[in-house]
Amino acid sequence: MISLVDTVAARAVGISKTYGHGPGAVTALDRVSVEFVRGRFTAIMGPSGSGKSTLLHCLAGLDSVDEGAVEIAGTDLTGLDDRRLTRPRRDRIGFIFQSFNLLPTLSAADNIRLPLALAGRRPDRAWFERLVDAVGLRDRLAHRPAELSGGQQQRVAAARALAAQPEIVFADEPTGNLDSAARGDLLGFLRHCVDSLGQTIVMVTHDPVAAAYADRALFLADGRIADVLDAPTAERVLDRMKSLAEVD
Ligand SMILES: Nc1ncnc2c1ncn2[C@@H]1O[C@H](COP(=O)(O)OP(=O)(O)OP(=O)(O)O)[C@@H](O)[C@H]1O
């Protein structure tokens, strides 16, 4: 029998996060509990200011929580100082940002391999080749970021996030700076990574079409999980967004 613990890539247990003190304090997360099962693609949605980025940053160990616990592959990140967070962040977590964040002086291939180089790890050649094919960048590997389109740059960033075969990949509005063709390419790649490479992906998005690529959409409102939709379609996501906006 497969233990449930083995199937969970990441979980948050009752996490809260408040920014600031006194009358100006903002509760960005209010006792959020959620699990991300291995090999699944989750979209996080919700109105502006509902806590989506804060949740992603806390799950990825980029921000600390005030209360509760975050686990990645059974390792509790809560309470680890920056030094002790370095390894899980580097080895177990991939992150894709809205603004690509590639190193301008490195080729696409070296950008993809950078996390492994920093970790002193030898790239798994077969995995690298699969990633490069999946992301459709074989004829662009020697190019620097400035010689690539925005969509190609974001696909390099996505391949970089997956290079170390992390337990989980977090993506914060990865399609925010892309046109619709590039958006489709990137989301198709992320979907492929889940279906064919067994990766686990959690993506913040405002876009119902992007959310429809996921297996599940979580809706945040005022720092809490307000709703969950399995097998989301763009229409159903839009309906939920409208009803959450009405409650607001
Ligand atoms: N570093 C910070 N200092 C103070 N307040 C913050 C900080 N980061 C976020 N907040 C506040 O916490 C709340 C949640 O912010 P967060 O960025 O997580 O929301 P979001 O759902 O990702 O929003 P958006 O869709 O606009 O990106 C907001 O009210 C925001 O102003």
Image (spheres, rainbow, N blue to C red):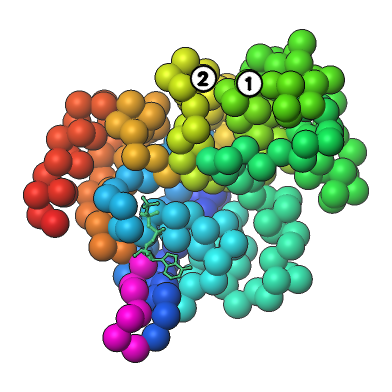
244 left or right of 223 in image: left
Give the camera-side residue of 225 and 7: 225
204 drawn magenta:
no
Residue 137 in view (yes/no): yes
Dot 1: what SS?
loop
Q: CA distance from mark 1 to mark 2?
A: 9 Å
Residue with the mark numbered 2: 182
Q: Which residues are magenta?
A: 22-28
Horizontal and vertical percent position of residue 170: 54, 45
122 left or right of 194 in image: right
Horizontal and vertical percent position of residue 30: 32, 70
Q: Earlier in the sequence, mark 1 or mark 2?
A: 1
145 left or right of 100 in image: right
Is 116 located above or below residue 207 in the figure?
below
Residue with the mark numbered 1: 149
Do the residues under discs 1 and 2 have CB atoms within 8 angstroms?
yes
Q: Amino acid at mark 1?
A: Ser
Dot 2: what SS?
helix
Residue 231 in view (yes/no): no
Task: Please state which of the two labelled residues, at mark 1 or mark 2, is closer to the viewer.
Answer: 1
Q: Amino acid at mark 2?
A: Ala
